[in-house]
Amino acid sequence: MGGSELSLEELELGILDNPEALKPRLQDLLEGDNKAGRTDSWVNAAWAASQVFKGELDKLIPILMEAEILAGNRNLHQQWVGIKLAILMHQSKADNVPTKEEFETLLKTVKTFNKPRLEAIVKAEYAFAQLYRNEAVFAMSLVREALHDVEKDAAARDFHLYNAYSSAVVVCGYLHDDKRLHSLNNTIFSLARTKNLRAALLNSLYNFIAYTMNKQDADQIAKAKPLFDEALGLAKSLQLTTQEAVLRNQYITYFTSQKNWRRAIEEADIALEIFERSRNLIWIADTLTKKAKVEITLGRFENALEHLQRAETIFPPDYTHDHMRIMESKAMALAGLKNFNVAFDTMAEFARRLKVSSDLARDQELNSRLAELGAQVEEQKNTMLERKNAEHLRTMNYQTNTIVLSACIILSAVIGLWVIYRQKRRLTDLNTYITTQVLDRYLPPVLVKEILLGNMKLDTDPAEKHITVLFADICQFTKATEQLGIEKISIVLNQFLSTMTDIVFEHRGTIDKFIGDSIMVVFGAPADMSGEEQAQQVVATAKAMMRALTELNREWERNGLGSFEMHIGIHTGMAIVGNFGSKKRSDYTAIGNTVNIAARLEKFAKANQIVLSAAVRAYLPHDETRSMGLYELKGIEKPIEVYTLVSHGSDSDVVQRKSKSAS
C-alpha cells in the first residue's frame, strides 16, 4: 500500500494479509485528518479500524459514530455496514450479541442497497449471534444465504468471500458437519494461499487445528502436523506473538497424543513465557492445566500439583469444565504421591459432578480408577496395622503362620472367584435381557452394539441437542378399527409398526415412542449426526415408509383387510433430550418446541403427504420441495412456512403426477 490515501480494496487486502502492520497507519490517519475536512480515506480508515481493533473499541466509538454518519451521507455502503455492526456489537447489553430485532432492522436497510455481498456480511454476524443463543439451525440457514449472496454478486471481492466462508466453517464445526467443514476449509485455504493472504490463512488454519484437537481422533491429530508447522511459521512471520502462543498451547495436545513428552513440555514453557509477558491469565491457566497432565505422565507429581493449584486460582468460578479438568488431574497427582485418601475423595467428587457426560466408557474408567484408589487406601491402612502387630507376629511359629496365611489366601481367592463368577453371570443375564427386550426394540443394531461396547450411553441427564423429529400416523385409524374389529386391526397395526421400525433402523433413526398407530422417530440422538445428515436420513426414511405402505396395502387388500393412508410431519431444531421420570421409572425421550412443531405438521399433512418445515428444507436441494405457504399451527406462537416433498414414490404420488400431466 503506497501513498497517504487508502482505498477500500487496499484496506481489505491489508486486513486479510497483515492487520498488525495496518494499525500504526490507521492510527496516524485517524488522528491526523482535520475535523473540518474528513475525507473518504478517513472514513475508510475508520471502517478498517472497526475490523482490526475489535477488542479495543472503547476509545474508537466517538470516531466510529462520526464515521457512520459520514458514510451514510456519502453512500459509502460497505463502510457504513461494517461500522454500524461494530457499534451494535459494542453497545449490545447481552454479551456483545445484538438482538434478532436489531439484526433484522439492519438487514432490511442493507437490502435497499441492492448489494448482496453486504447482506452476506450482516448475515454472517447474525449467524454468530444465533450460535451464541444455541440456535444452530437458524445460524446454518443464515450462512447458506450468505454464501449464496457472495457467489451471485459479481462485485464480491476476496474480503467478502472469506468473510462468508469462514463464518460457515464455524457454524459447521458447531453442528459437527465434518463433510461441509472440510470442503469450505479447502476453499478458504486455496483462496488464501493463491492470493498470499497470510492472516486469513493463519486464522483458518488455527480454527481447523482447534477443531481437530477437540475431536480427539488420533488419526486426524497425527495428520495435523503440517498444518501446525505452516500456522506457526505464519504467526512468526507476521510477529503475532499471542497467536504463536495459542498455537503452541495446541501443540501440547498434539505432542501428548504422539507421546513426545519432552516436546510437549517445551511447547508449554514457550507458550507460558509469551502469555506471562502479555498477562493473558486464562491462557496461562489453560496451558498450566495441560502441562500438569504431561508432568503426571512423567511421574513429576509435585510439579503437577503446583501447576494445578495456580491454574485453580486463575480460572473464574463459572469455568466449570476447566475446574473439573483440574480436579481430575489433582486426583491422579495425589495418587502418584501415594496420598490415596485425598486422591480417592477428589476423584469421587469429580465423578459426582460428571453428570452430563454421554460416554459410558468414561464412566467405567472413573469407576475403575475409584476402585483402584479405594484398594490403595485400604492397603495403606493394612500396612499401618501390620506395623503395629509386627512384633507380635514375630513370636508366632513360622511354620504354623505360613500354613494359616496360605489357607487364608486360598480361601480368599476361592471366595473372590466365586463372587466374580456370580457377578459376571448376573451381568451376562442382565445384558441379554436389556439387549433383546429393550434396546433392540427401539434402537438400530449399530447403536445397540455401540451401547453394549460402552461407546455410548442412554442414562444421561436431559441436555439441549440439535435433533430432527418425524411423526407418522395412519389416517382414519379409529374408523378402520370399528370396521375391521380388534383381531384384524391388530394384524394391520403390528405389520405396519414392524415394517416402519425396520425402515427407521436402516436409516439410523431412534424410535422415541409408539402412540397407538403413530410413531415418533428421532435423528441425532443418542448418536450424534450433523444437521445435513439428519435431514437426508429423515427424508429417505419418510419416502421409504410411503413406499412400504404401498406394498403393505397390496398384501392387506389380498387378505381382505383393506388399504390405508398415512401422513408424515418433520421438523428440525434444538430440543431437550435425555431421561425424564423418577428413579424407579424413566424414559429416554425428547421434549420441546421442535417436537411440538413436528407433531403439528403431521396433523396438518393430508393423506399420503410428507410435510416439513423451512428448517428441514434448508438442508435439502430446493427442487425436491414445494412451498405450501405460511400457516398458523395450533399451539405454535408464530406462523410456520410449510413445505411438501415434490415426490416420494407412493402409489398416490404416481396417480397425482399422472393427473397433473393429463390436465
Image (cartoon, rainbow, N blue to C red):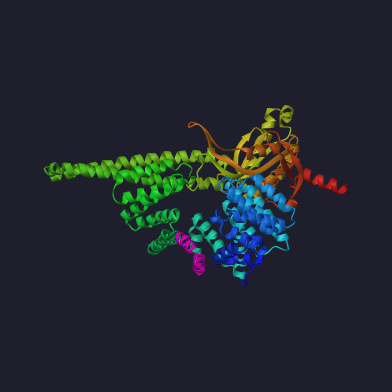
Q: Going 50% across and 46% down the picture, which residue do you hit?
A: 456
> Please, which residue is most extreme toward the front here?
36
Asked if 244 appears above or below 281 in the picture, the reply is below
**Res 25 quadrant in image:** bottom right
**Of 435 and 554, which appears nearest the observer?**
435
Q: Write the start and end of the magenta stretch as one range.
A: 225-250
Left or right: 584 in relation to 389 = right
Q: Residue 534: give x, y in percent of width and height.
A: 63, 48
**Of 332 and 54, which appears nearest the observer?**
54
Q: Is residue 482 visible?
A: yes
**Of 114 and 534, which appears nearest the observer?**
114
Q: Residue 394: give x, y in percent of width and height.
A: 13, 44
Majority secondary structure of magenta residues: helix
Left or right: 477 in relation to 246 = right
Q: Quadrant of the N terminus?
A: bottom right
Q: Residue 178: give x, y in percent of width and height.
A: 58, 56
Is residue 406 a member of the stretch shown in magenta?
Answer: no
Asked if 190 appears above or below 511 in the picture, the reply is below
**Of 4 and 625, which appears nearest the observer?**
4
Asked if 77 appears above or below 315 in the picture, the reply is below
Left or right: 588 in relation to 163 = left
Q: Residue 377: give x, y in percent of width and height.
A: 29, 44
**Res 601 quadrant in image:** top right
Q: Is residue 172 visible?
A: no
Is residue 246 a member of the stretch shown in magenta?
Answer: yes
> Please, which residue is most extreme toward the right here?
663
